[in-house]
Amino acid sequence: MRDKVVDFAGSDAFLTDKEMAEMEPVVHVPTCMGAVVVAYNLDGVKELKLTGEVVADIFAGKIRMWNDERLTALNPGVALPAEAIIPVFRSDGSGTTFIFTDYLAKVSPMWKEKFGAGKSVNFPSGQAAKGNPGVAGVISQTKNSIGYVGSEYAFAQKIPYAIIQNARGEFVLPTAESISAAAAGTIPADTRTSITNADAAGAYPISAFTWIIIYKEQNYSGRSKEQAEATLDLLQYILSDEVQNITSEVHYAPLPAKAKELSMENLKAVTYDGVAILQ
């Protein structure tokens, strides 16, 4: 996008202040809500409960066996095997990794200090795979594995995923309802916000917006005014009730009303030759 060769960019990670300062003004438009699930492959285990700190310790290599006492304490009556845990993570930089590690950095001081949050993180052990499809594929084919993947892939491929404890102490499965609940708090005017580990009842703790990002000034790289108008027409359509009402059918969750309202206001600031496109 920095090279100004596209109409817009899509990302699960909003641009940081530093990234924003390095380019011309842009507008973030949330399209829907998604989540990152902790998927696993364990014979006979249909339900797995995890806390954020336990997930962090698994991916940091501190919890290495499935029958570790911290895992068995969270899952009484579940036959966890005496087998080594095989973590699976993204080999490529991604918004999925950003959301996952942003969550871990919030719930685990150890993770925040040693690994931090980012689109790429140096995981200490495990198996790397490219893209959400790659990680989902490795988990599906590898016994005793665990990994993080976009919820839409887990939902569509019916890969088992864990029930995660949220900030209220509730153990929550990712659903359209629990993902939307994570956005119950205050949303900044530019919509750039992290909603992982949200302090809201019923919220799934590894939830996020997914954005389309466009340049505020649309006259660049030979783009016509008609192209700019078509881009805004598309974004208004995405924000419409018609589209938002079908997000769950494609394994996402609808935006809260506040996010749609803010996005519509932000689109009014988009210009062509300095003149607002939406009148």
Image: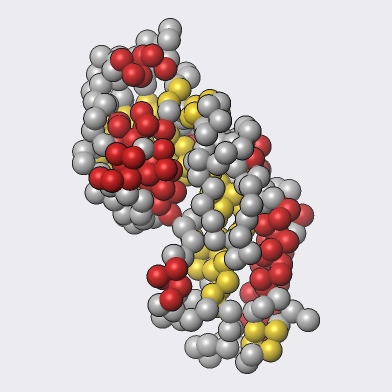
- Asked if residue 131 lies left or right of residue 247, the reply is left
Q: How many marks?
A: 0
Q: Is residue 68 above or below residue 160?
A: above
Furthest-top residue in this view? 77
Q: Residue at x 67, y 73 (%)?
A: 267
Furthest-left residue in this view? 124
Quadrant housing residue 69: top left
Q: Is residue 217 visible?
A: yes
Q: Position of residue 13 (x, y in %)?
A: 46, 58
Pick the residue in front: 5 or 38.
Answer: 38
Quadrant housing residue 104: top left
Q: Position of residue 109 (x, y in %)?
A: 34, 40
Q: Residue at x 67, y 65 (%)?
A: 263
Q: How is the image coloured?
A: secondary structure
Pick the residue in front: 87 or 164.
Answer: 164
Which image quarter holds the C terminus?
Answer: bottom right
Q: Is residue 278 above or below residue 240?
A: below
- Asked if residue 214 lies left or right of residue 53, the reply is right
Q: Position of residue 148 (x, y in %)?
A: 40, 39
Q: Residue at x 41, y 48 (%)?
A: 102
Q: Is residue 176 visible?
A: no
Q: Residue at x 32, y 49 (%)?
A: 116
Quadrant housing residue 87: top left
Q: Position of residue 131 (x, y in %)?
A: 37, 50
Pick the residue in front: 166 or 272.
Answer: 166
Which image quarter holds the N terminus?
Answer: bottom left
Q: Is residue 74 above or below residue 54?
A: above
